Image: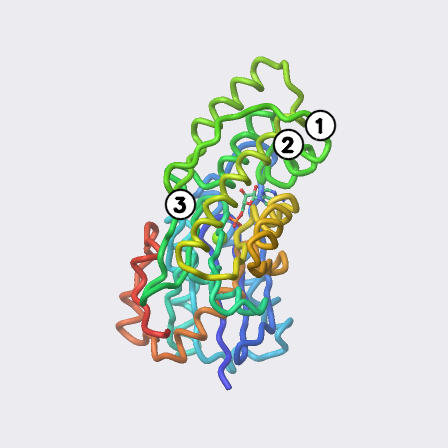
Amino acid sequence: MSIILGIESTAHTFGIGIVCDGKIIANKMDMYTTESGGIIPLDSAKHHREVSERVYKEALEEAKINEKEIDAIAFSQGPGLSPCLLEGIKFSKKLSKKLKKSLVPVNHCVAHLEIARVTGALDPVLLYCSGANTQVISYASGKYRIFGETLDTGVGNFIDNFARCAGIGFPGGPKIETLAKKGKNYIELPYTVKGMDVSFSGILTNLKQKVEKGNYSIEDLSFSMQETVFAMLVETSERALAHVGKNELVLGGGVACNSRLQEMARLMCEERGAKFFCPEKPLLVDNGAMIAYAGEIMFNSGIKFSGKKAEELDIKPRQRTDEVEVRWK
Ligand code: AMP
Ligand code: MG
């Protein structure tokens, strides 16, 4: 039996999850939010510093374990915002020293893919739609590969940016979803799929101009934005499924909480006879449980750092999914 603690701190959320033999026994988190404006990395890092001890205690309570029972500490090594990642690694190293347990560095995007196993998916393609990241990922020929991705911002940041210019604070996505449900008229927007990649900056400029002109309602713009952008994401996911010959799609990332995106992805899967999976919200957003879950798989394959090696571990703010050296598959 092994008990692995996972620490997530890549952006706005500080989360701690605990996994015991593939079973999630705790998943606690605290998210940095703002009234207006986006994430200020140093503020978010300060948030993580302030909530870390409390979230840690809550996770231990939820798991009903004593900290001495922890076998290893997994943490999000990247990609993410440096000041936020630094808080996570600092906390992890402190704990590793105190408990005399090894560290397991986890790639955040890979964790979003691996946690899909709890939904029953065996070898899926992941449509990962979060704030800073937008990628279509799958494991193929010995590596986690990116089949398509954004050429500029992540879809969540794009939606938050659109929300901000309509006077809505962070995170804007949930409020935009509510507004979109009231929209009735489809307003044509640029549809930017380039090969297997997507791009949002042109659509954002176009939307901003429309908001400034004031001749469209924010409800109709929100509705049209969702229809356009989600169609782009579902299109590239479908082509990735066809390309790698897989028949399971799973969603990940905060934007995947959106019920319209879920509906469109589900419909696409039904039409091509593929299986559709969507983890529950606490496992869809940034969370510590997925870090613990992926960390346990890595730990069991012998990936662990202790002593001087643990001390020397560093964050990887720009680590790419396909750079991850896979020794556990
Ligand atoms: P993550 O970085 O994966 O935790 O996701 C955070 C992003 O998800 C933020 O940009 C949010 O605005 C976005 N988000 C959260 N809920 C929704 C929703 N219901 N619809 C669209 N975007 C959402
Ligand atoms: Mg994420």
Q: Residue at x 69, y 32 (%)?
A: 179
Separation (CA) of disc 1 from disc 2 = 7 Å
Is the C terminus in the top left, top right, bottom left or bottom right quadrant? Answer: bottom left
Q: Residues within 10 Å of mark 2 (few under 14, many from 20)?
A: many
Residue in the image at 40% along x and 54% along y: 243
Question: Where is 24 relative to 279, above or below?
Answer: below
Whichever of labels 3 and 1 marks the residue nearer the N terminus, that label is 3
Question: Label 3 sits on what residue type?
Answer: Glu
* Mark number, residue 223: 2
Instruction: Answer whether labels 1 and 2 touch (C-beta < 8 Å).
Output: yes
Tell me the residue at 64%/43% (across/down).
Answer: 260
Q: Secondary structure at mark 3?
A: strand
Judged from this view, the residue extending furthest toward the front is: 272
Residue at which label 1 appears = 184
Locate residue 251, reporting x and y percent.
54, 54
Question: Does residue 32 appear in the picture of this structure?
Answer: yes
> Residue 149: which disc?
3
- In the rendered structure, which amino acid carries the disc numbered 2? Phe
52 shown above or below 186: below
The Cα atoms of the two marked residues, 3 and 1, are separated by 30 Å
